[in-house]
Image: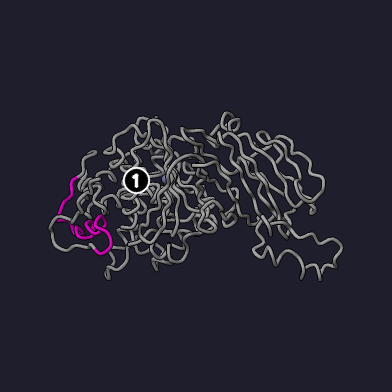
Amino acid sequence: MAGWRRIRLGAIPALVALALSGRASAADGRHRYTVTVAKDLNRLQVRACFTEPAPGVLVAHSHRIPKDMAGLRVVAGGGPLPSPQTGQRRIRVPDEVECLAYSVDLAAAARRSLHAEVQQVPGGLVASPRQWLWFPYRRGRRQDLDLTFRLPAGVRAAGPWPTAGSEGTTYRLGQRPYRWPTRVAIGRFPERVLEVGGARIRVSMLRGSPEVDRPGLLDWIREGAQALTRVYGRFPVPRAHILVVPVARGGEPVPWGEVQRGGGEAVHLYIDQRRPLSEFRSDWTLAHELSHLLHPATDYDAPWLYEGLASYYQNVIRARSGQLTAEQAWRKLHRGFRRGRRNTDPDQTLAQVAQAMEGHPDYMRVYWSGAALFLRADWQLRAEEDGTRSLDTVLEGLARCCLPSRRRWDPDELLRRLDSLADRPVFTELGQRYAPATAFPDLTRVYARLGLWAQGQELRLIDRAPETDLRRSIMAGPGKRRRGNGPPAHRKRSVP
Ligand SMILES: [Zn+2]
């Protein structure tokens, strides 16, 4: 604890104060938070100690915190600290406050939680830090903090942030906006680190009831991560957290999956651990969520862009890694396009349904229109004479310039960046054509050139088509471009 406390400056003149102040000893200027977890995991004690420059205010990024917290008080230094009222999201912190403390009733928060912000599961809980942290800001800018967990024996706290030191119980916060969503798992569960494609992937798998088949599911996750490296030979970001929460319901292996980027890239998978491993292996959700790591966080008003990219690659990477045959992958894309086309209301543009997608039944159109855009862009790039470009090479460029990204991108900016990486305006042009359209993107010419012969939901691959090689190269991946009419290469599916 020594060295954490802000050095009191008293009446030292300002210039001297700057020279003598704690900024040297607290050179990193990071505030120090300690979170002590109760043995029964039902309660947290938060102690927040501030270095120079002091935060002017603490901000809650959830209106629920004041409801579930108690005993907010100054524990070092001085100054009045009014208790926040229910719904209050800001506390002004007088400069004299060196440390403050409060507790949070997680069990109550879990009972009140509407959208699983705090969720108790067998052997632990999963909670959004926005439900128990007051974040430091000074003059409207977030400040960095180190968050140290003090845990009961055998308990782990797994979050997406980078860790300080080798102990792994102190996390460094502040690189991403605090309002961005994320989750922390606290409980008794083992953890594994996978090294895949140059990335360090931390896998936290909660225990669940019944208990999960840990080795089998870990293999499934490793194979999923390896499949993603088949886009351009490496994992898109150097670090990621995969959180697996077994909920024993849903009737499918992964009833819910999502990517969250607060604190770092994280994939959260809510699984029905009662399903057999074979179902996990043939499910698309993991490939879809991992494919979202190919792009930066993007504004929510053009979901066709990022959902389209993930929907396209969820099939492409599974074919490249041998989880699907090329024919199966094309068939899945084709059926997706059909679902999107059937879901297209000719009275509305894609942009209109995309804006209202939340809770809206038109999401099939949104996802698969976007996937159609990326198939078309990939085809256009690959069909060029020199044959050096593809969607893969463009995304590799995106990773090189821009990932991981600490800000949210405007969709038009992302399209323009993809254009500049492709050296031609292919993405912006397709976006400008499809977003205001009332019809589903027309893929007739792409199908004909690639040798995709469709009848209803059936699809056959025609090897005499003008661009059969190009079709094969899409599902074979980098370094696997084939010539001639032989069948495409597939790796054998690995067996656990
Ligand atoms: Zn998605």
How far from the left and from the top, in percent, is residue 120?
51, 33
Name which residue lies at 23% across and 56% down. Answer: 471
Q: Is residue 109 left or right of residue 452?
A: right
Question: Is residue 469 shown in magenta?
Answer: yes
Q: Which residue does the numbered mark 1 point to in the structure image?
A: 218
Q: Disc count in the image? A: 1
Q: Which type of secondary structure does the marked residue at label 1 adopt? A: helix
How far from the left and from the top, in percent, is residue 484?
14, 62
Q: Which is nearer the eye, 258 or 223?
A: 223
Name which residue lies at 36% across and 36% down. Answer: 212
- Around disc 1, counting alpha carbons within 10 Å, would you say few (fewer than 14), some (14 to 19), or many (20 or more)? some
How far from the left and from the top, in percent, is residue 336?
32, 42
Question: Is residue 477 shown in magenta?
Answer: yes
**Image quadrant, ligand 1:** top left
Which residue sits furthest right? 11
How far from the left and from the top, in percent, is residue 201?
41, 53
Name which residue lies at 35% across and 47% down. Answer: 221
Q: How is the image coloured?
A: one colour
* Residue 110 appears in the figure: yes
Q: Is residue 175 left or right of residue 416?
A: right
Type of residue at label 1?
Leu
| Beta carbon of the mark 1 residue lies under 8 A of ligand 1 | no
* Residue 375 appears in the figure: no
Q: Which is nearer the eye, 72 or 39?
A: 39
Q: Which is nearer the eye, 160 or 347?
A: 160
Chain part drawn in magenta: 460-479
Q: Is residue 134 left or right of residue 306?
A: right
